[in-house]
Image (tube, grey):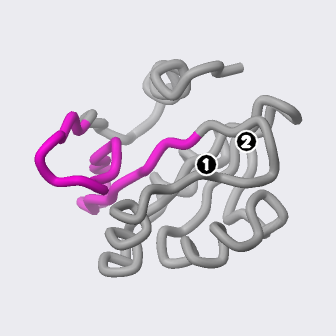
Amino acid sequence: MAKLEKDLWRELKGIKSKISWTRLENRSLLGTPDLLGYNDTGRFFTVELKLTSVNKIRFSPHQISFHVKHNLNTFILVACTLDKLVRLYPGARILELVDSGLKLEPLREGLDACCLELERL
């Protein structure tokens, strides 16, 4: 189980998938998600990686703003160190995620299931 965000990235790219991943290291455009994905159906999408050990998930105001403004084909992948589950949420639900934390029903649970969801976009 990931202990750091970079560990979650390593686990994700280690899964056999039809997704081509690009890690975005962007220090000039605050709030830009961590990953750009491209699947074999020709869709681009972004994924924000988050780790938490509690119900609450921390987002910067810039991250919230990005997902509010770009609410199509954006996702948040959250790994919880307590229950060792990885959850996928649509970026369009970021405000609900800020309010409810992990109590919000995810789109998918489990890293493999999350990848399959993104492959099917």
- Judging depth in this view, the residue of 98 and 35 nearest the camera is 98
> Looking at this rendering, what residue extends furthest in the right direction?
83
* Spatial separation of the CA atoms under disc 2 and disc 1: 6 Å
**Left or right: where 38 falls relative to 57:** left
- Judging depth in this view, the residue of 113 and 105 nearest the camera is 105
Q: Which quarter shows the N terminus? A: top right
Q: Residue at x 31, y 47 (%)?
A: 37
> Looking at this rendering, what residue extends furthest in the left direction?
28
Category of crowding for the residue at label 1, using alpha-carbon neighbours closer than 10 angstroms: few (below 14), some (14–19), many (at least 20): some
Amino acid bearing label 2: Gly
Q: Which quarter shows the C terminus? A: bottom left
- Judging depth in this view, the residue of 113 and 69 nearest the camera is 69
**Left or right: where 64 falls relative to 40:** right
Work out whether 25 lies above or below 66.
above
Give the percent coordinates (x, y) of residue 67. Answer: 39, 71
Q: Residue 114 — which label?
A: 1
Give the percent coordinates (x, y) of residue 101. Answer: 74, 61
Give the percent coordinates (x, y) of residue 7. Answer: 53, 19
Secondary element at tag 2: loop
Give the percent coordinates (x, y) of residue 61. Answer: 41, 65
Magenta segment: 24-50
* Residue under pointer 2: 110
- Is residue 42 rendered magenta in the image? yes
